[in-house]
Amino acid sequence: MMMEEPNRKDKKGVLGRYGLIVSVMMLFAVMIIFSAAKIVFTAEGKKWREVGEKETVIRDRVILPKRGNIYTFDGKLLATTEPLYSIYMDFWADGIEKDTLMKYAGDLSVALAKKFPDRTASQYKNVILNGWKMRENEERQIRENEARGIDKKVPIRSRYVKILRRDISYVDLKEIRSYPFWNQRSNRSGLIAEERNARKKPFGNLATRTVGNVYKDLDKGGASGLELKYDSLLRGVPGVKFRQKIQGKWMDVVEKPAAEGWDIVTTIDADIQDIAERSLRDKLIETEAESGTAIIMEVQSGEIKGIVNLDRIGEGVYAEGNPNAFSYMNEPGSTFKTVTVMVALDDGVVTPTDSFHVGSGLFQYNKRWVRDHYWRRGQDRGYLTVAEGIAISSNVVMSKIALKGYENNPTKFVEGIDRIGLRKQLKWDVPLSGIEGTSSIRFPDDKTNYWSKTTLPWMSFGYESKIPPIYMLMFYNGIANGGKMIKPFIAKQFIEDGQVVKDVVSEVVNPMMCKETTLQQIQEMLVGVVKKGTAKVVASDYFSVAGKTGTAQIASGGGYGGYYVSFCGYFPADKPMYTIFVGLRKPQGVPSGGGMAGMVFKNIAEQIYVRKVQLAVEDCKVDSTLQKHPPLKNGNWDYSQTVLAALQFPVGNLEQAADWVKVKHDSITYQPQAIVLNGFLVPDVREMGARDAVYLLEKSGLRVNLSGAGKVVSQSFPPGQKLVKGTTISITLQ
């Protein structure tokens, strides 16, 4: 019994202590629950949540959408969006250690200088060390303020120190993440890669005025061309995300994903565009013209396959500038004579065989002289028929046609132009301002555009009106298209998430511009212009051409200064495939619509014919000046062989195996010669196209700055020079 008493006391003591512990723990639990409830349901809790969120969450950050791509008709990229990264360091990163930073700062700087040589290794090291010193100064200032009881916020600039001057690609970003010190987790390395979208044109300046540009700040969208016209579709819809700190590492959490912009498929054919640019540029350089334009349109579809707008920016240097195809608001000159004859034939005023006296090419009306281009020669040509007047481009014949039919009723003449469709106001695929891209043709009762006593005869041969090239192209294409006038267009398809949401078809401006008999007569006359008229130099041995030359003085300051020469026509004349307009503004020398603009037409047409119709080799006359065997660019031999085989052109043997070759034509065959590459020397990319040249240079470790279009004519580092990887080489194409 004596032993049981102490045991009971011990047991009671244990239970008492256990009860006390449980009571204390329950008290703590109640306090925790009370505090949690206070934080959840009271204003004080709201305050602490805001503080916590401020430290661990950054809200309402915009997710930039990927801007839509712009393609050629067959899927080649004309403009695309690629991510670029701005590189910073956060010297307040949680895991960054001073000793490790100091140990690897030198090695990191050397690696950066080798990759991005716009700074030396010592300069990179100074940037990094100065960033750390900035952090230490900020820490010191914070401690001093706390010690003094000063409630003043210290600006923290060392959280966001820019290390690289320029933005880099994702490939470069992956590489620098392997560099010393930066090969750690971001919270230890402090590396920040801030992504932004940038616009890239894989074909360089090809069709750049038509494709257009975007603002440097991509958020502002398109600045010109298709980029501006369809900016609302291309730009997409921004998303929303917030950054949250999880286990010491910042992570992005998407609240609303961004919607990518629509893609646009254009009608542009990259090959035809390249042909047109090179042909026009060569003639502009030869004639020292101020500017020029060339437009190639597919006859039946209305699709613009190539459109070139070149302005002189320096001696012998031309680049895409103004939208000349739409903004050349000039008097068209003799290309308008076809309009006059069409109206007169349709109204029964004349027939193709009616004749008019022209004499020596001078005709006076209301004390103002109408002159033909041959008037100074004193040659008496007697009478010319309407067809002959078109062929030799007689101003006198056109004036007398207009006066015969419309002198007492000029309104009827302009109504005939209306009937064709040339006064219709149309909207185009590129943004324009003012009267650009519209025809400005006078009307007799127009109070703002005075109709004078001589307006009618002068209008008949292409003065007193302003008609941009795109309208003349549309008119002549209507003649080629059996009288059906359709509006030229560039944007062909709109694609959202890989699905076509809109197909664009040609808009019919006028289903029949004139009577069937009138159309046939006009077509015969335009063939005559090339066979025996002012455009004889445009004739081709391989297909028939129909068209009309134009030479007009340019109105300037109440007088005239310089000439505008043009040619508009189609080929093959018997079965039209393409209509082409070419215009040159202020060429030097004797102005000639045939010899200047017409020769550009011929060069473009024959090269298109070779590529699209694939002439058999037996039809090719090697000694001809008509380029049946076009020059071949240097470059990848596999690609060249494929093209030559498709065209059935004869090819010589490659003496030694090689991927890259120079190709010469020896009047019989194409002779390849191997390009020997040395990984330590700058390769020779002259005479190559942009794609091959850029690929070869970048493969060698160089960065490429490209200007122009065509083939490479110069490179800033000469071939064979010692190669320094990471440096930038500039190449010029023409």
Image: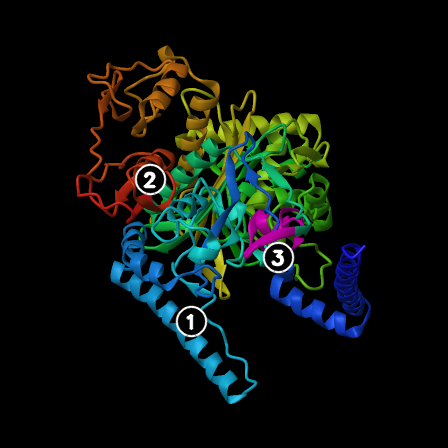
Label 3, on which residue?
Answer: 244
Q: CA distance from mark 3 to mark 2?
A: 39 Å
Name which of mark 1 and mark 3 comes first in the sequence: 1
Q: Are marks 3 and 2 in contact (CB under 8 Å)?
A: no
Question: Does the rendering let one see residue 363?
Answer: no
Where residue 410 appears, as percent x and y from the top left, is 70, 50
Magenta range: 224-253
| Mark closest to the chain's N terminus, 3 or 2 | 3
* SS for callout 3: strand
**Residue 30 location, x and y as percent?**
80, 65
Residue 135's disc is 1
Q: CA distance from mark 1 to mark 3?
A: 23 Å
Residue 531 at what x, y percent from top left? Answer: 45, 26
What is the quadrant of residue 356 in the picture?
Answer: top right
Element carrying mark 2: helix
Q: Earlier in the sequence, mark 1 or mark 2?
A: 1
- Element marked by disc 1: helix
| Amino acid type for the residue under numbered disc 2 | Glu
Q: Disc number at residue 693? A: none
Q: Is residue 197 left or right of residue 36?
A: left
Inspect the image, locate mark 3, and give the three-letter code of the amino acid beneath it.
Gln
Residue that mark 2 sits on? 698
The residue shown at (69%, 41%) is 421
| 302 displayed left or right of 657 | right
Would you say residue 98 is visible in this rendering?
yes
Circles 1 and 2: CB atoms closer than 8 Å:
no
Identify whether 27 is placed above or below 388: below
Marks 1 and 2 sit apart, C-alpha to C-alpha, by 38 Å
Neighbour class for label 2 at 10 Å: few (<14), some, many (≥20)? some
Q: Amino acid at mark 1?
A: Arg
